Amino acid sequence: MKVTVDLVILTIRDDELHVLLIERGNEPYRGCQALPGGFLRPGETLEHAARRELEEETGLDAALLHLEQLRAYSEPNRDPRGRVITMAFLALGPDLPIPQAGTDAAKAAWAPVSSVLPEPDLLAFDHLTILRDALERARSQLEYTTVATAFCPEPFTISDLRKVYETVWGLKLDPSNFRRKVTRADQFLEATGERRFTEPGRPAPLYRRGPAQLLHPPLLREGHLARRHTTTSALR
Amino acid sequence: MKVTVDLVILTIRDDELHVLLIERGNEPYRGCQALPGGFLRPGETLEHAARRELEEETGLDAALLHLEQLRAYSEPNRDPRGRVITMAFLALGPDLPIPQAGTDAAKAAWAPVSSVLPEPDLLAFDHLTILRDALERARSQLEYTTVATAFCPEPFTISDLRKVYETVWGLKLDPSNFRRKVTRADQFLEATGERRFTEPGRPAPLYRRGPAQLLHPPLLREGHLARRHTTTSALR
DNA sequence: TCAAAAGTGTTTCTATTACACCCATGT
DNA sequence: ACATGGGTGTAATAGAAACACTTTTGA
C-alpha cells in the first residue's frame, strides 16, 4: 500500500485567495497542474512528510505556515499507477515569494483559486476535489479558530486581518464591528505598541498573534444575508 | 506501508457515554482492550474498510451508524509490529445490542467512557489518544451539526435528544430553552405526528431526523449552568 | 387529586447589526 | 483643507439564560 501526502497551500495575494500549484514533470498527468505532495518515507510521520514536501517542492519555510490534516482520499482508482491513498493537508501562510531555484521547485507558482475552480480538468488526480474540500474547511476554520492570522505576516493591522476574512469568505464586513469582535476575543491579538503609517489616513496599531487557538465567541459568517426561515439550499 | 482503520464507536446507555471495545486475541497487546479495527484491503476505500470491520468485529449494522473520518495517526513506533499508519473513524449510533455470536465478535462489549479514560494502560497502541481526540470531536460536532440524532433510535422525543447533549457534554441543559432551540433550527427535526405515552407525565411528541446536516444557529455549549434541584411544583 | 413530564411566557442580559460621527495622518 | 482610513457611540434587533407558570397524562 502506497501512501502520499498532498498539500493545499493557501495564501492571499492582491486581495485574492491563491493556491500553490506545481507542474508535474512525470507521468501520469505530465505537464498537468497538481497540488504539491509526495510519498511518505519509512521513518516519518504524515506531518513530517507534509513539511518536507512543502520545503522540497516549493522552497517555502514550513515553520511559517499553519499546517493541519484535512482528510484522507482512498478511492481505489484515484491514481492510475495503482493503489495510492493520500492524506491531504491544509496549509495557510502569508504571501511568500516562491524560490524559483532548484529542480523540484522550478515549476511551483501561486494560482488564483477563482481561476482553478471552474476548470474541471486543470488539476491532476482528484486534486480539484481536495481543493474544494480544503476551501470549505478553511472557510469554517475562520469562524471558530484563530487561524486567520496565519495569512498575515507579523506584525499586522486589524484591517489586514479583516481583509483575510473578506477574501476567504467572499463578502464585505463592517470594519468597526469587526474590530470590536476581534479585540474583544480573548488572547486572539496582542498589541505591539507600534503603528503602521500609510500615505493617507490615520496610522493603524500593529498586532501579533495571541496564544488563543479557539475563538470565543466565534465569528460567524452569514451576517449579510437576511436570515429568515428560508429553506436555504442544502450544502451537503 | 501497512494501513489500518480504527473505530471509535460511541453510544449512550443508561445516560452514560459508552465506547465499543474488543479484547485482542492476538499479539501484540493480547488480552488487552482495543478499539475495533483492522487492515485496509486492496480494493476498498478507508470508509468501506471501516464499515466492514465494524460489521465483522461487532456484528452491528453499519448502515445504522453515523461514520466519519477523524484523523490519521502515523507515529513510526505506534505499532510494535512495524510501520502501520491508521485512519481513525468516529462512529455514533443508538444503543444497539452486541451480537455475541461469531469468533470475531465474541469479545466486543460496550465500556463506559468514564471508566476507560482514567486507565492509561487499559487500551492497546495509541488508542487512548485516539479515544480522547474522538470525544473532543464528538463534543464539538454536537454544537455545529445535527449528528446528535445519530445517538437516538427513531422515532425519538426532544427529551431523548436533550439527554444526548447532556451526556456528551457532561452538563445539564434547561429543557424549555433546549426545546425552543432545536425546534427553531431549520430542518433539524420532523414531527411524526405520533406521541410517546410513558407512565406518568404528559405524552411527548415524536420526531424523526430532518435533512439538515448543519445547525443554524449552532447550539453552543459553554453556559455551564447547573439547573436547579427540583421541579417547580415540588415546593408547593 | 397528585406527581411527573411537556410546553409556554416573560424578564433580563448580552451579542450583532447598521450607521452616524469623531480622530489622526499625508498631501 | 480635505481625502482617507482608523476608531467610538449608540439604537434596534435577535438570541441566550433563568425561571415562573400552565397543560396533559397515569396512577
Image (cartoon, coloured by chain):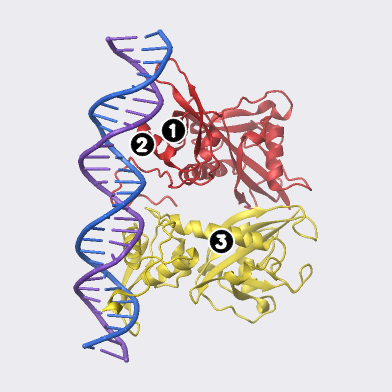
Chain colours: A red, B yellow, C blue, D purple
Q: Position of residue B53 (x, y in %)?
A: 64, 67
Q: Position of residue A121 (x, y in %)?
A: 56, 37
Q: Image height check: is B198 above or below B43?
A: below
Relative to the observer, which residue lies in front, D25 or A186?
A: A186
Q: How many marks?
A: 3
Q: Quarter of the image holding residue C12?
A: bottom left
Q: Chain of mark 1?
A: A
State whether residue B101 appears in this view: yes
Residue neighbourhood size for the residue with mark 3, other residues' Cα within 10 Å, grouped as few (<14), some (14–19), many (≥20): some
Callout 2 secondary element:
helix
Callout 1 secondary element:
helix
Foreground disc of the pair 3, 2: 2
Q: Chain of mark 3?
A: B
Q: Position of residue B34 (x, y in %)?
A: 68, 68
With B152 as the anchor, is B136 left or right in this view?
Answer: right
Q: Report the residue marked by disc 2.
A: A177
The reply to whether callout 3 and callout 2 are in contact (CB within 8 Å) is no
Q: Amino acid at mark 2?
A: Asn
Q: Amino acid at mark 3?
A: Leu
Q: Residue A162: give its label.
A: 1
Q: Residue at x 33, y 65 (%)?
A: B179
State whether residue B48 appears in this view: no
Q: Chain of mark 2?
A: A
Cα–Cα gap, marks 1 and 2: 10 Å
Q: Report the residue marked by disc 3.
A: B135
Foreground disc of the pair 1, 2: 2
Q: Residue at x 38, y 62 (%)?
A: B210
